[in-house]
Image: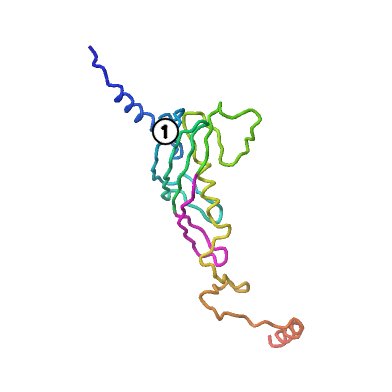
Amino acid sequence: MRAEVPADRNDQEARVAHTSRASNSPYHFSVRDVARRPGAQRLVSETFPAPAVLGTELIGVPTGSEVRLELSFESVQEGIWVSGTVNGTAIGECGRCLDEVRLEVAAPVQGLFEYPDSRNVGEDEESEDVFEFDGDSLDLENVVRDAVVTSLPFTPLCDPDCPGLCDQCGARLADDPDHAHEVLDPRWAALQSLTDEKES
């Protein structure tokens, strides 16, 4: 005769089974353990290599760099409220002198993932921080990506006072504050060219 398993043990095993990843993507999370249970909450702390660059063409968390997610999944009447932070190190290029720029990212992540049957007919589907999901698992890739992109500077700088490069020879001006070129009065340019031709 099969021994009866206590109800609390069944519930515990079910929770463990349902907290596994929804797919191979590190941004996919199963939420069957908290879905449709208003008030239920689960905390998530995950660290993984970024499968793709998080950022812009100028600066971002490179592929393979460590990304850390510290999140809360809270069940509400309409769906799952996600909040927390994404952390990583963004690497880019200074917009003035082209030197490497490294920035520590701690971007806030938040959004309401609504059940398919919770959205009212005619409701604005373009609401910020509101997304649809299948009621079973969350795909946070776009939410995380948007959070990182909006936290990064439009023009990364190695230093707020970076003087950049010389527009004539490309020299790094921070290395030579007194760097300068002789500026010839345009009115003498023609005469200078004649002198150069004569000397040659």
* Identity of the residue drawn at 47% across and 60% down: 102
Give how far across and how far down residue 104 sits, in percent: 45, 56
Percent of width and height locating residue 25:
45, 38
Q: Amino acid at mark 1?
A: Ala
Question: Extreme top residue here?
Answer: 1
Snapshot quadrant of residue 69: top left
Q: Is residue 145 above or below residue 160?
A: above
User: How is the structure coloured here?
Assistant: rainbow
Residue plotted at (67% across, 82% down): 183
How crowded pointer 1 is (Cα within 10 Å; few <14, some 14-19, many 20+) is rated as: some
Q: Quadrant of residue 97?
A: bottom right
Measured from the top left, where is residue 4 in percent x and y? 26, 17
Q: How many marks?
A: 1
63 displayed left or right of 124: left
Which segment is the magenta one?
A: 89-109
* Spot occupied by residue 1 in the image (x, y as percentages of width and height): 22, 11
Considering depth in this image, is 2 or 200 the residue closer to the camera?
2
Report the residue marked by disc 1.
40
Question: At numbered mark 1, what does the secondary structure look like: helix, strand or loop?
Answer: loop
Residue appearing at x 53%, y 29% in the figure: 115
Q: In the image, is 46 to the left or to the right of 129?
A: left
Query: Is 135 in front, or is 96?
Result: 135
By secondary structure, the bulk of the magenta-drawn segment is best described as: strand
Q: Nearer the viewer, residue 91 or 137?
A: 137
Quadrant location, the C terminus: bottom right
Which residue is at a point 48% across and 57% down the rendered structure image? 91
Residue 22 is one of the magenta-drawn residues? no
Does residue 141 appear left or right of residue 180 in this picture?
A: left
